[in-house]
Image: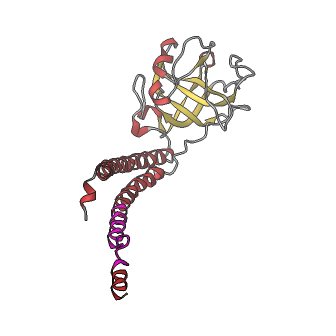
Amino acid sequence: MYRFLLTPRWVALHIVVLLVIPAFVFLGRWQFGRFEERSANSDVVTGNMTSAPVPLGELAGPGQPVKESDRFKNVAVSGTYDIEHGLVVRRRPQDGRPGFYVLTPLVTGGGQAVLVNRGWVKAGATADTPPEVPAPPTGQVSVTGRLRPGETEESSGLRERPGLPPGQVLLIDPAKIGQTLPYQLVGGYVELTEQRPESPSAPEPVPAPDVGAGGGLNLAYGVQWWLFIGIAIGGWVLLIRRELADRKAQEAEPEPGSGDSAPQQAEISTN
């Protein structure tokens, strides 16, 4: 009765099922791993954004990259803005609008400074038109903001290209930007959230990062892949049982003419 399972068609089906099951197991485990990774990252970022501000020097220094565990921690720093060496960062949309980030060095003394992302401004009429950038306050200022690591092509998904208009960059890369400055830059940069004294006009604040559901979608996808394992096995078993039922029904059917031959012979003999 089960010899049909060894026919080429069924052997091919067995192979497909045996390949699909470990593939679904792998994809489910991968999604669960992504869930754990993103949940941990969400917890770190959320905790750092709600932390009390600490002096910038405790977490970052010249040529010292920002630690992953310190991303988005609130820091405080004082100094004077170097308007002459201010920059704008291209390809920074906000709320669906094209625009720039306003990047201004804050000189803290001792031959050191930190890049401050003062906020967002809308793009000009053309790609090469300089945006209108509100001037920062003069004199001593106190800045509070989120500490961010310097950007790279890998971390940002952007690619550097030559020929940009003067005063424009694509990446917030303190190591590269600092090569043209008369002081040392801190390895990361500060995303402004508060400033004293405040400016009469200022760029739009950069919104806090959306940490999302902490990998909730990955958890759902992982469960989904493992449900597919049950569906694959259940479908395989169902097809086998259906084939068996069809074969049993065929065997139970009488052969053509076999059921009427005996009565017909009896009728002939009586006549």
Asked if residue 254 is positioned above or below residue 162 in the image, the reply reads below
Residue at 48%, 51% (x, y): give it: 217
Asked if residue 133 is positioned above or below residue 255 in the image, the reply reads above
Question: Horizontally, is 8 left or right of 36 in the view?
Answer: left
Picture coordinates of residue 192 (x, y %)?
Answer: 58, 34
Picture coordinates of residue 171 (x, y %)?
Answer: 53, 23
Q: Is residue 47 or residue 32 the one in the foreground?
A: 32
Q: Is residue 255 or residue 183 the one in the foreground?
A: 255
Asked if residue 54 is positioned above or below residue 140 in the image, the reply reads below
Residue at 37%, 65% (x, y): give it: 242
Question: Horizontally, is 18 left or right of 90 in the view?
Answer: left
- Classified by dominant secondary structure, the portion drawn in magenta counts as helix
**102 falls in the magenta region:** no
Q: How many numbered circles are shown?
A: 0
Residue at the limit of the structure toward the right, as seen here: 125
Residue at the limit of the structure toward the bottom, as seen here: 270
Which quadrant of the rendered structure holds the N terminus? Answer: bottom left
Question: Horizontally, is 236 left or right of 109 in the view?
Answer: left
**241 falls in the magenta region:** yes
Picture coordinates of residue 227 (x, y %)?
Answer: 40, 58
Q: Is residue 174 or residue 96 the one in the foreground?
A: 96
Q: Is residue 201 or residue 254 the one in the foreground?
A: 254
The magenta stretch is 239-261
Kindly indicate the quadrant of the structure image that contains residue 271.
bottom left
Color scheme of the displayed model: secondary structure
Picture coordinates of residue 74 (x, y %)?
Answer: 50, 40
